[in-house]
Image (cartoon, rainbow, N blue to C red):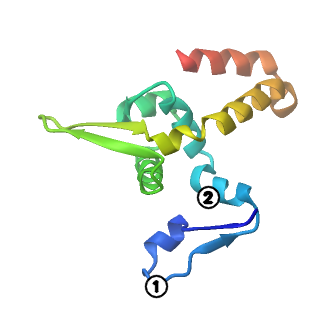
Amino acid sequence: MGGTAVTEQDKTEANTSVPKKYKVGVEAALEVMGGKWKPLIIYHLFTGCKRTSELRRLIPDITQKMLTTQLRGLEKDEIVQRKVYSEVPPKVEYELTEYGWGLKPALDLLCYWGEEHLDKVYGDRSKVLEDFKSSET
């Protein structure tokens, strides 16, 4: 089924922009949680609230600027919520919204598919699985 949704680009343009129309649902899903970093951020938030520094440790290849940009996008799309604590120094945590939790079944299936096909995708399944499992702890 086709649908209409507002994209990140639409949100940053003038309010008179026409919402993007999608031909298939996967386009809308990828608009919200697609890319290299958003699925990883969402995946790590499935285990609970995280501070920015925790997400940086869990996703070591992401830059601080990119993490901030991705978190802001996920927050605008109401996938994550930002909790700010009034203390010094300021404490900020990110957690999935109820809407964001709706992505779990889809991301779980992607994880299962990836685990089943690591040898084809990466060539050395044992090394990747070892690294993958150690990053979960």
Q: Nearer the viewer, residue 86 or 53?
A: 86
Residue 126 shown left or right of residue 47 in the figure: right
Rendered view: 74 above or below 91: below
Q: Report x, y in % for residue 65.
A: 41, 50
Q: Quadrant of residue 27?
A: bottom right
What residue is rendered at 51% in x and 65% in y?
8
Residue 87 shown left or right of residue 27 in the figure: left
Image quadrant holding the N terminus, namely: bottom right
Disc 2 and disc 1 in contact, CB within 8 angstroms: no
Number of labelled discs? 2
Residue 44 shown left or right of residue 86 in the figure: right
Rendered view: 123 above or below 67: above
Give the SS element for disc 1. loop
Residue at the disc numbered 2: 31
User: Which numbered disc covers residue 16?
Assistant: 1
Q: Amino acid at mark 2?
A: Glu
What residue is rendered at 29% in x and 40% in y?
83
Question: Which is nearer the N-term, disc 2 or disc 1?
Answer: 1
What residue is rendered at 55% in x and 66% in y?
7
Q: Report x, y in % for residue 89.
A: 15, 35
Q: Is residue 62 visible?
A: no
User: Which numbered disc covers residue 107?
Assistant: none
Q: CA distance from mark 2 to mark 1?
A: 20 Å
Rendered view: 97 above or below 76: above
Give the SS element for disc 2. helix
Rendered view: 71 above or below 92: below
Front tag of 2 and 1: 1
Q: Report x, y in % for residue 77.
A: 48, 55
Q: Nearer the viewer, residue 27 or 118?
A: 27
Q: Amino acid at mark 1?
A: Thr
Q: Is residue 50 visible?
A: yes
Bin the neighbour count of mark 2 within 10 Å (Cα to Cα): few under 14, some 14-19, many 20 and up: some
